[in-house]
Amino acid sequence: MAQFILLLHENVSRFADLTPEEMQQVVARYGAWGRALAEKGKYVGGHKLTDDGGRHMSRAKADIRVTDGPYSEAKEVIGGLFIVDAPDYEAAAALARDCPHLDFGWIEIRQIDRT
Protein backbone atom coordinates (compact mmCIF):
# COMPACT_ATOMS: atom_id res chain seq x y z
CA MET A 1 0.00 0.00 0.00
CA ALA A 2 1.19 3.51 -0.74
CA GLN A 3 1.98 6.03 1.97
CA PHE A 4 1.08 9.70 1.91
CA ILE A 5 2.30 12.60 3.99
CA LEU A 6 -0.26 15.16 5.07
CA LEU A 7 1.59 18.46 5.55
CA LEU A 8 -0.38 20.79 7.80
CA HIS A 9 -0.01 24.37 6.57
CA GLU A 10 -1.19 27.17 8.82
CA ASN A 11 -1.07 30.91 9.32
CA VAL A 12 1.44 31.64 12.09
CA SER A 13 -1.05 33.82 13.98
CA ARG A 14 -4.00 31.40 13.75
CA PHE A 15 -3.55 29.93 17.26
CA ALA A 16 -2.26 33.10 18.96
CA ASP A 17 -5.57 34.15 20.53
CA LEU A 18 -6.55 30.75 21.93
CA THR A 19 -6.65 30.37 25.69
CA PRO A 20 -4.71 27.45 27.21
CA GLU A 21 -8.02 25.61 27.67
CA GLU A 22 -9.01 26.16 24.04
CA MET A 23 -5.58 24.99 22.90
CA GLN A 24 -5.97 21.80 24.95
CA GLN A 25 -9.30 21.19 23.22
CA VAL A 26 -7.62 21.59 19.82
CA VAL A 27 -4.85 19.17 20.82
CA ALA A 28 -7.50 16.68 22.00
CA ARG A 29 -9.25 16.90 18.59
CA TYR A 30 -6.01 16.08 16.76
CA GLY A 31 -5.36 13.19 19.15
CA ALA A 32 -8.85 11.77 18.62
CA TRP A 33 -8.47 12.06 14.85
CA GLY A 34 -5.11 10.25 14.95
CA ARG A 35 -6.57 7.47 17.12
CA ALA A 36 -9.48 7.07 14.67
CA LEU A 37 -6.96 6.65 11.82
CA ALA A 38 -5.08 4.06 13.88
CA GLU A 39 -8.29 2.12 14.53
CA LYS A 40 -8.82 1.98 10.74
CA GLY A 41 -5.25 0.70 10.30
CA LYS A 42 -4.31 3.80 8.27
CA TYR A 43 -2.11 5.73 10.72
CA VAL A 44 1.65 5.43 10.17
CA GLY A 45 2.86 8.37 12.25
CA GLY A 46 2.62 12.05 12.93
CA HIS A 47 4.39 14.95 14.55
CA LYS A 48 3.72 18.52 15.60
CA LEU A 49 6.61 20.74 14.60
CA THR A 50 8.05 23.43 16.84
CA ASP A 51 6.92 27.00 16.32
CA ASP A 52 10.43 28.35 15.66
CA GLY A 53 10.24 27.99 11.86
CA GLY A 54 13.25 25.71 11.51
CA ARG A 55 16.16 26.42 9.17
CA HIS A 56 16.53 26.80 5.41
CA MET A 57 19.56 25.37 3.61
CA SER A 58 20.75 26.41 0.18
CA ARG A 59 23.87 26.25 -1.91
CA ALA A 60 25.42 29.35 -3.45
CA LYS A 61 28.27 28.06 -5.61
CA ALA A 62 30.66 26.37 -3.17
CA ASP A 63 29.05 27.80 -0.04
CA ILE A 64 26.23 26.15 1.86
CA ARG A 65 24.07 28.63 3.71
CA VAL A 66 21.86 27.90 6.67
CA THR A 67 19.43 30.63 7.62
CA ASP A 68 16.56 30.94 10.05
CA GLY A 69 13.19 30.29 8.55
CA PRO A 70 10.57 31.08 7.71
CA TYR A 71 11.43 34.66 6.99
CA SER A 72 9.74 37.38 9.03
CA GLU A 73 7.38 38.25 6.17
CA ALA A 74 6.15 34.65 5.92
CA LYS A 75 2.54 34.24 6.92
CA GLU A 76 2.44 30.44 6.68
CA VAL A 77 4.38 27.60 8.22
CA ILE A 78 4.08 23.83 8.22
CA GLY A 79 2.88 23.16 11.73
CA GLY A 80 2.96 19.38 11.63
CA LEU A 81 2.49 16.25 9.60
CA PHE A 82 0.76 12.91 9.50
CA ILE A 83 1.72 9.86 7.45
CA VAL A 84 -1.12 7.59 6.34
CA ASP A 85 -1.52 4.38 4.37
CA ALA A 86 -3.82 4.74 1.37
CA PRO A 87 -4.04 3.14 -2.08
CA ASP A 88 -4.13 6.48 -3.95
CA TYR A 89 -4.50 10.26 -3.63
CA GLU A 90 -8.30 10.06 -3.55
CA ALA A 91 -8.24 7.68 -0.60
CA ALA A 92 -5.65 9.82 1.20
CA ALA A 93 -7.85 12.89 0.69
CA ALA A 94 -10.85 10.94 2.00
CA LEU A 95 -8.89 10.12 5.17
CA ALA A 96 -7.95 13.79 5.61
CA ARG A 97 -11.48 15.07 4.99
CA ASP A 98 -12.35 15.11 8.70
CA CYS A 99 -8.92 16.21 9.95
CA PRO A 100 -9.37 19.02 12.48
CA HIS A 101 -6.59 20.96 10.80
CA LEU A 102 -8.96 22.06 8.04
CA ASP A 103 -10.48 24.40 10.66
CA PHE A 104 -7.09 26.14 11.04
CA GLY A 105 -5.31 25.92 7.70
CA TRP A 106 -4.89 23.67 4.68
CA ILE A 107 -3.40 20.24 4.04
CA GLU A 108 -0.89 19.39 1.34
CA ILE A 109 -1.04 15.70 0.36
CA ARG A 110 2.12 14.15 -1.09
CA GLN A 111 2.80 10.53 -1.93
CA ILE A 112 5.97 9.09 -0.44
CA ASP A 113 8.29 7.62 -3.09
CA ARG A 114 9.28 4.24 -1.68
CA THR A 115 11.41 3.15 -4.64
Image: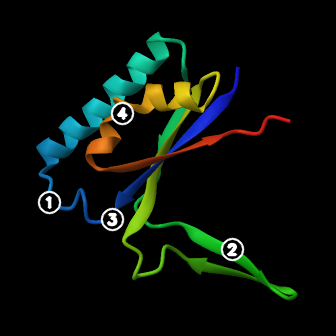
Secondary structure of the residue carrying tag 2 is strand
Q: CA distance from mark 4 to mark 3?
A: 19 Å
Element class at badge 1 = loop
Q: Amino acid at mark 2?
A: Met
Amino acid carrying label 3: it is Val
Mark 4 burial class by Cα count in 10 Å: few <14, some 14-19, many 20+: many
Looking at the image, residue 16 sits to the left or right of residue 64; the answer is left
Marks 4 & 2, CB-CB < 8 Å contact:
no
Question: Disc number at residue 103?
Answer: none
In this view, the mark in front (1 or 4) = 4
Callout 4 amino acid: Cys
**Residue hosting label 1:** 17
The kind of residue tagged 1 is: Asp
Residue 92 locus on image (x, y percent): 53, 29
Residue tagged by mark 2? 57
Which sits earlier in the primary sequence, circle 2 or circle 1? Answer: 1
In the picture, the disc for residue 12 is: 3
| Disc 1 crowd, CA 10 A, few/some/many (<14, 14-19, 20+) | few
Quadrant containing the C terminus in the rendered view: top right
Which badge, 4 or 2, is on the more N-terminal residue? 2
Q: CA distance from mark 4 to mark 2?
A: 31 Å
Mark 4, residue position: 99
How many dots with numbers?
4
Disc 3 or 1, which lies upstream in sequence?
3
